[in-house]
Image (tube, rainbow, N blue to C red):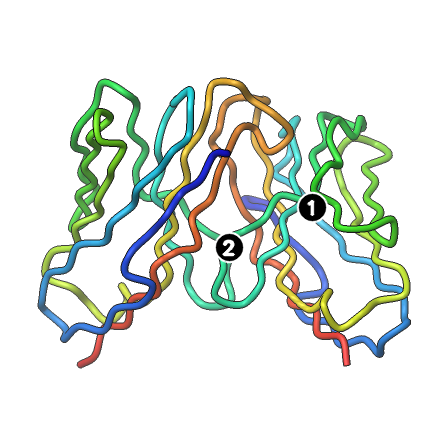
Amino acid sequence: GAGVSQSPRYKVAKRGQDVALRCDPISGHVSLFWYQQALGQGPEFLTYFQNEAQLDKSGLPSDRFFAERPEGSVSTLKIQRTQQEDSAVYLCASSLLRGSNEQFFGPGTRLTVL
Amino acid sequence: KNQVEQSPQSLIILEGKNCTLQCNYTVSPFSNLRWYKQDTGRGPVSLTIMTFSENTKSNGRYTATLDADTKQSSLHITASQLSDSASYICVVSTLSGGGADGLTFGKGTHLIIQP
């Protein structure tokens, strides 16, 4: 596709459930980023991939959060045993090269944990 | 600690009026500053990017300014339209890289244009 796509667009989970959020970056983009955006806030960095390598996961809030990009294209962000404070929009962005700073964002997945 | 502060937090103006959004940053070393527009339910989209040597850049009705000495930037919107209603996020990049590609995000200004 022409842009970054994410699915699902909306996800409602009961507290304690596991969820998996998918990101399809722009074809050929080496770098992929996950962000968490709380209501009324700017995006907060979660983790970063260069191809299939997860080079930085310093922003992941707990060990319940796990991300992978096994073939260097599609990425999945998994949240185990969801809690209410996990409710947020999860944005994925990709860029052609690391350090290019031109990140293209997907529409996000809005996660609501009840 | 690298920080980006935006003001106002929210703004309501009438259609056709102009407005200016502010961004102050403490990011160092500075690489570039970008303004993003984020429509409700969508991801941010880049409007302008400025490097250290640039002090103004326009994109249609949007004009961004940068004062690298005072570490301030502004985004001026001329003749506002209903479609300008969105959050505007200031993002500053540092040369030192890092996991987030050295990006520090502001919290955004939520702009509402009323007819």
For mark 1, give the secondary structure.
strand
Task: Pinpoint the chain carrying mark 2.
Answer: B
Horizontal side, residue A103 vs residue A29: left or right? left
For mark 2, give the secondary structure.
loop
- Residue count near mark 1 (Cα–Cα under 10 Å), binned few <14, some 14–19, many ≥20: many
- Place residue A54 in its image quadrant: top right
- Residue count near mark 2 (Cα–Cα under 10 Å), binned few <14, some 14–19, many ≥20: many
Q: What residue appears at the point 60 percent right and 33 percent down from the top-left corner?
A: B100
Disc 2: which residue:
B43
Q: Quadrant of the N terminus of chain A?
A: top right
- Place residue B84 in its image quadrant: bottom left
- Place residue B58 in its image quadrant: top left
Amino acid type for the residue under numbered disc 2: Gly
Viewer-side residue, A90 vs A84: A84
Q: What residue appears at the point 85 percent right and 76 percent down from the top-left corner?
A: A15
Q: What residue appears at the point 44 percent right and 54 percent down from the top-left corner?
A: B107
Residue A60 picture location, percent across and down: 75, 46
Q: How many marks?
A: 2
Disc 1: which residue:
A24
